[in-house]
Image (cartoon, rainbow, N blue to C red):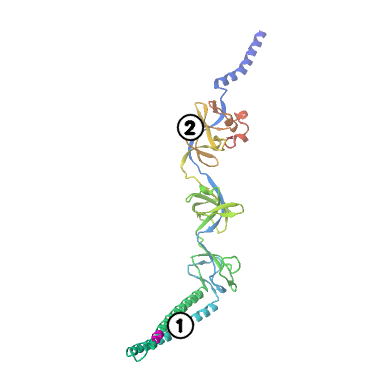
Amino acid sequence: MKFERKWLAAILVVAVVALPLLVRGCRGDSAKQVELVTVEARAIDPTILAPGTLAYRNEVNLTSEITGRVASIAIKEGDMVREGQVLLSLDPEIYRNAVDRAEAGVRQGRLVIDRQRATLALRQRQFDRAEALVRERMIDQGSFDEARNQLQVAQLDLRTSQEDFRRAQSALEDAREQLSKTTIRSPITGRIVSLPIKVGETAVPSTSSFVGAQLAKIADTSRIQAELKVDEADIARVAVGQAADVYAAAYPDDALQGRVEQIALAPTVEGQGRAYEVTVALEVPDGIDLRSGMSVRAEIALGDGAQLPAVPVEAIVTEFDEDRQPTHYAWKVEDGSASKVEVQVGIADDAWQSVGEPLQAGDTIVRGPARVLRQLQDGDRVEQRKDGAGEGEGGDGGEDDGAGADAE
């Protein structure tokens, strides 16, 4: 009886050990535990990061066209001004004197012309008399030629005086123009955002940054834009009309919507790098107070929002040939078997990669783990791993969560 019990206990132990093995054999223990995903249509939005600054859409640095001491200032920083409004005045004394001199020159020119006309009239009468006398043979030919020459000289003198008069008139117009520039008016309607000049300082016609070169800065503060610096390696992917999210340093969590409006044709050189200025027109919501000169960072969206077949970037295996030309593969699963297929890839973002033939939306592919992707062979049996399974094959989470496998 005891002997039978021992055999019964032995049979139970064998059953306990063998049954799981049998079950695993029936399920196909050779199937590798992998992550399976489905090719799905989705919008992929890759972006380019670019730093920059804000600037008002219409901004004018007001400078003087003449040299003069500032006599009065009619505005202060922050004031709203209208186009044509007087902002400040320069001392006009020396320019008024120039106008007086030019007016005197014009008056003198008129007197000279009147004198030349009188002389011409005299020479004309003398010539007419000499012409009549030479026909009567009362004077010789030499006297007649002299009278004719004096008439021609008088005509030239009058013409010269008329040209001098026109020159004097132009000088008067220039002097009046210079005098008018002593009154500085606003070229646009906007707000005074900067007023560095003071009464008593000397305004100078220059674009340099020394004192007196800039009188004021006027801007239409209702419209603002971002001026970004895009690296030359990325500029070929930027196009007018692309959407952009702009984050101002003062509002780091608020994305300002905008669109690329202009792309510079010539680069700016900073150190060893080259960048192209990209202008983004912004839509500023209420409650956000932006100012020119603020630092910003922008994400320029390269996608058009179209739905494309896409897979996680980890599912794509990239191999390089001897010429370092890449070829992209994915492991397609059909009836539990994995097969390696070459795929065409398109745009990608941080998580998703668009793919073309032979993959289509609805196909099943292997996503990982990365170690398993590198070890798979055509025809290998695979199955969706369960939570916690495949640790021995796929390694720890640090490798499973890595990017897609690359092979040489």
> Is residue 93 shown left or right of residue 134?
right
Which label belongs to residue 109? 1
Q: Position of residue 239 (x, y in %)?
A: 49, 49
Whether residue 18 is situated above or below residue 86 in the rendered picture = above
Task: Write down the residue under mark 2.
Answer: 363
Residue 152 among those drawn in magenta = no
Whether residue 140 is situated above or below residue 387 in the rendered picture = below
Q: Nearer the viewer, mark 2 or mark 1?
A: 1
Q: Amino acid at mark 2?
A: Asp
State the image quarter where residue 139 is shown. bottom left
Q: Position of residue 172 (x, y in %)?
A: 48, 78
Q: Amino acid at mark 1?
A: Gly
* Identity of the residue drawn at 53% across and 80% down: 97
Characterize the local packing of mark 1: few (<14), some (14-19) or many (20 or more) Cα atoms within 10 angstroms. Answer: many
Q: Position of residue 355 (x, y in %)?
A: 49, 37
Q: Is residue 385 visible?
A: no
Q: Quadrant of the C terminus?
A: top right
Whether residue 402 is situated above or below residue 389 in the rendered picture = below
Furthest residue to the left? 136
In this picture, which residue range is highlighted in magenta? 145-150
Are the residues flagged by discs 2 and 1 in contact, CB closer than 8 Å?
no
* Identity of the residue drawn at 55% across and 56% down: 54
> Is residue 10 shown left or right of residue 205?
right
Between residue 233 and residue 61, name the one nearer to us: 233
Task: Specify the principal SS of the magenta part.
Answer: helix
Q: Position of residue 63 (x, y in %)?
A: 54, 68
